[in-house]
Image (cartoon, grey):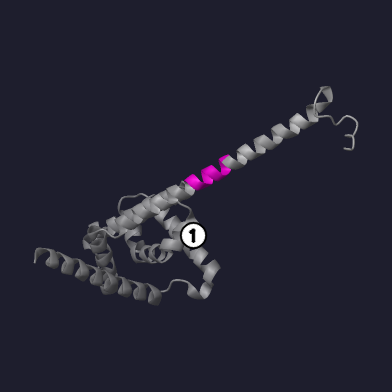
Amino acid sequence: MKPPLEPGLTLTGADSEWFWMMTQAAILLITLLLIFFKLRATATANAIIALQQFEEKWNTPAMARARFRVCQDFLSEVVPPDHDVAYHERRVLDFFEEMAIYTHHSALTNSIAWETYSSQIECYWIMLDERVRDLRVRYNGSSYYERFESLAKWMQSESDRRDGPNNATSEATIRSFATSEVARLQDQADIEQFKLNAEEA
């Protein structure tokens, strides 16, 4: 024998409004949760696609040559004529400015960018910082590469928070990064040349 429902708690009739209100609330909550998880999955998928696109662009031969020259110039303390930003420097700056725009509009989160490009963002900004400042003075515009600068500062603060201030970028750290980058890009160029020679043989 089933126990009777409490007075006023019926599933049918005029006193069943409580049941249908709770049912509607549960359905609404489930719907909102489904929408949230769908949007989250879509954002993750879009971030992965964006990262793949940046990775492809970062490793193109033209970008590799630009990165190589930026690092070589920094190590050799080469200054472009008239202190203007050289083409290979602009290519690297434009790459990170585009990435910073993505993070600014949440198409790519800062944390994902930190996980994948923190060293590159911090080091290349420091290597090109003076060039950007000269560009801003030369053309009287403070907005040149401001997104990149903002992202680089955030990356540095995040690195300090995660790794401690002892790991903050220094002249020695930047030179070590540039030296490693030159060697890595040289090896990459040698491999590409080897493949090209093998195809022509």
Q: Which residues are magenta?
A: 35-42
Position of 144 with respect to 8 (left or right) is left
- Above or below for 136 versus 72: above
Q: Give x and y (percent) for residue 109.
A: 48, 53
The quarter of the image holding the C terminus is bottom left
Disc 1 marks which amino acid? Trp
> How packed is label 1: few (under 14 Cα within 10 Å), some, or many (20 or more)?
some
Q: Residue at x 49, y 59 (%)?
A: 154
Residue 11's image quarter? Answer: top right
- In the rendered image, residue 41 lying in the magenta stretch gets the answer yes
Q: Give x and y (percent) for residue 139.
A: 31, 50
Q: Residue at x 26, y 67 (%)?
A: 68
Residue 181's image quarter? Answer: bottom left
Residue at the outermost top position: 14
- In the rendered image, residue 46 lying in the magenta stretch gets the answer no
Position of 120 with respect to 6 (left or right) is left
Give the prevailing secondary structure in the magenta stretch. Answer: helix
Viewer-closest of 16 and 42: 16
Would you say residue 86 is visible in this rendering? Answer: no
- Above or below for 156 versus 13: below
Position of 11 with respect to 166 (left or right) is right
Q: Residue at x 39, y 77 (%)?
A: 172
Q: Give x and y (percent) for residue 145.
A: 37, 53
Give the labeled residue for mark 1: 154
Would you say residue 185 is visible in this rendering? Answer: yes
